[in-house]
Image: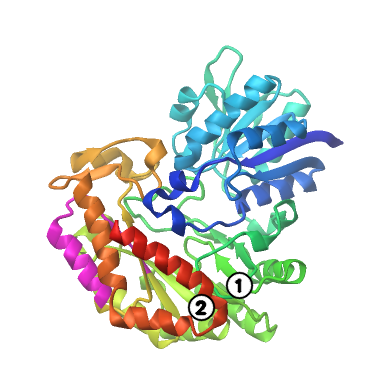
Amino acid sequence: MYQETPVVLINPPITREERFGEMAKHGATAPPLGLCYLASVLRRNGIKSRIIDALSFEKTMEETVKEILSLNPRYVGITAKTVAIFRAAELAEEIKKADPRISTIIGGAHITAVPRETMERFPQVDIGVIGEGEITIAELIQTLEENRDLRNVNGLIIREDDGNLFLTAPRPPIENLDSIPLPAWDMVPHLKYYHESATRFSKLPLGSVITSRGCPGKCLFCDNSVFGRRFRSHSADYVIGMIKHLKSNYGIKSLVFYDDYFVADKRRLKEICLKMIEEKVDLEWVCSARVNAITGEMLSLMKQAGCFQIAYGIESGNQNILNLQQKGITLERVRSAVEMTYKAGIRTKGYFMIGHPTETQETIFETIDFAKSIPLDNFQATYFTPFPGSPAYDIADKYGAFEKDWKKMNMWDIVFVPRGFTRKDLRRYLKMVHRKFYLRPQIIWSYIKLMRDPKYRRQLLKEGFAFLKEMAT
């Protein structure tokens, strides 16, 4: 019925410098899974769509607009995190200039967090999709095609003919995630063109999946307005089906689980791991986990199933800061989890921030000293960034100078400076903590051992030289 209705879904053009700031040379790329899910739902509903991943392939704005217009779409849907929202709006404006008849739609984390403010700032956007978009996008396009009232479609903010904004009823969370078809990976370029750090993978091509939604954590800096706090997940059978599909159709050899809380459901995790072992999936994979959810038995099973690395959000080596950030963890528990992971033979990565509210020079040194005292293989520190939709966004200015510049909210540019610091101080400390962690004999030796494998060598050398150059400037 809708085969003559082209919908173009866009990952908007944004430079590596805009995405990663000072660490532009170290950024990874991954397929736009959110758009792949939307495209698969549209296809199931008989609605033709195309995906343009302008972000990952560093297309210019001019190239992106030209490609969009060549497809003669009636609807253009753009996904955008906070750091990309200005580029998304610029793209919508260029499309409107070229053809005012095209409906411009924006979805994603940013507009979900601050829908009215976003629509007021960017009048070139016609419709905003709030929250999970799979059910909404199909209903939206069908309603537009049949010229029905958009007010009856849940999960939208609409710019009406008189310019006023109207919020429709909230879209309830999708209860049965298995009801969503597999992502339309066939609509993006071959997976071999996406890349991750060699410190995470030696085997390519790389696949990525999201197997659950929602995180019960209450971290001050986190915006979970899209998926919410309640954990929902695909079944183990669905997950194994996704993995087998990627392996048989795209020949993947490594896998990233991009879940916020992959290990939340221990029974499901056990079932996934056992199926990966029994069915000889034979992939190396990485995931993120909360330190208070880890057990030795779980780690042993994950290792057998091919787990190569687990990333933990640690954030600080000062307990008072962890408490203020409502992390719900202790330094003792962090140490225990990282040590258990190390003993299980799984590499570990720690995510940290500097420039927290109440941060001092002493707490920064406590953080790097703590990171060095536990068996972490990889260390990444970014600047504390209060994103729209997070509790921190509304209170950060009580603790220091907060510049609410959405363009800079990539975690590598400074938007929040706690009292007692300057931007120059924070930049100096960020480089210092990385130098102190990585320029140690045991860490250098661990990477030398990795380079014995020729699959790692070239990329590790490239990343290593880039890192040293960044730290020296």
Q: Which residue is mark 2?
A: 308
The amino acid beneath tag 1 is: Ser
Residue 269's quadrant in the figure?
A: bottom right
Residue 200's x, y, as percent?
49, 71
Residue 356 located within the stretch drawn in magenta = yes
Residue 317's quadrant in the figure?
A: bottom left
The amino acid beneath tag 2 is: Phe
Q: Is residue 265 above or below residue 188?
A: below
Question: Which labelled disc corresponds to residue 293?
Answer: none
- Left or right: 353 with respect to 253? left
Q: Is residue 219 above or below residue 338?
A: above
In this rendering, does residue 210 appear at all? yes
Q: Which residue is mark 1?
A: 254
Q: Residues within 10 Å of mark 2 (few under 14, many from 20)?
A: many
- Identified at 57% across, 48% down, the residue is 173
Q: Which residues are magenta?
A: 350-372
> What number of labels is visible?
2
- Left or right: 195 with respect to 466? right
- Left or right: 439 with respect to 196? left
In this rendering, does residue 155 appear at all? no
